[in-house]
Image (cartoon, helix red, strand yellow):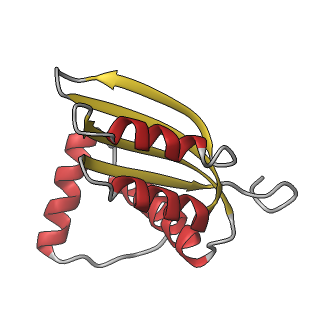
Amino acid sequence: MQRVTVTLDDDLMAELDALMAARGYQNRSEAIRDMARAGLARARTEAAPDAPCVAALVYTYDHRAREVARQLTSAHHDHPDLAVSSLHVHLDHDTCLEVSILKGQVAEVRHFTDHLVSRRNVQNGEVVIIPVPQRGSAGA
């Protein structure tokens, strides 16, 4: 391991300490390592749109809205190369939550998720994209 000295202003240090307490980190090094890994993963996905990835798309929608459930299902069926699996949950009488597991190239996954979440009557949506090292590459 390498030892690195970093200078942080008081406000940023207070935010880091609050995050550590909320998430149960034992020390600042663990917290900063996790944030560095997350930032590097995000940078890899942004820099390599053709790179392979897996993703979890989580969104809610009003299932009673005209045609939305059919349109969402059709979007998944129209992309069988990306859509691996889905979980459907009834949150209340009107609202459903879906979790879709996707696999493909970063750009394709982003395009699919952006268009799905921007549909009318999709209320909330978030995607987590995780780069997948190619076999034979470092870290695989």
Q: Quadrant of the N terminus?
A: bottom right
Q: Is residue 83 left or right of residue 64?
A: right
Q: Is residue 84 left or right of residue 139?
A: left
- 88 vs 108, left or right, is left
Front one among 91 and 77: 77
Coordinates of residue 50 in the picture (x, y in percent): 68, 70
Outermost residue on the right side: it is 136
- Residue 39 vs 126, above or below: the answer is below
- Which residue appears at 84% of the width and 54% of the height? 135
Q: Quadrant of residue 51?
A: bottom right
Q: What is the x, y in percent for residue 53? A: 63, 55
Residue at 54% of width from left, 63% of height from top?
41
**Residue 138 place in picture, x, y as percent:** 79, 62
User: Which residue does the image show at 47% across and 37% down from the upper left?
Assistant: 73
15 is higher (above) or lower (below) than 66: below
What is the count of numbered marks? 0
- Where residue 89 appears, as percent x and y from the top left, is 34, 23
Q: Residue at x 16, y 52 (%)?
A: 18
Can residue 2 be seen in this snapshot? no
Residue 55 visible to an observer of this rendering: yes
Q: Closest to the observer: 107 or 139?
A: 107
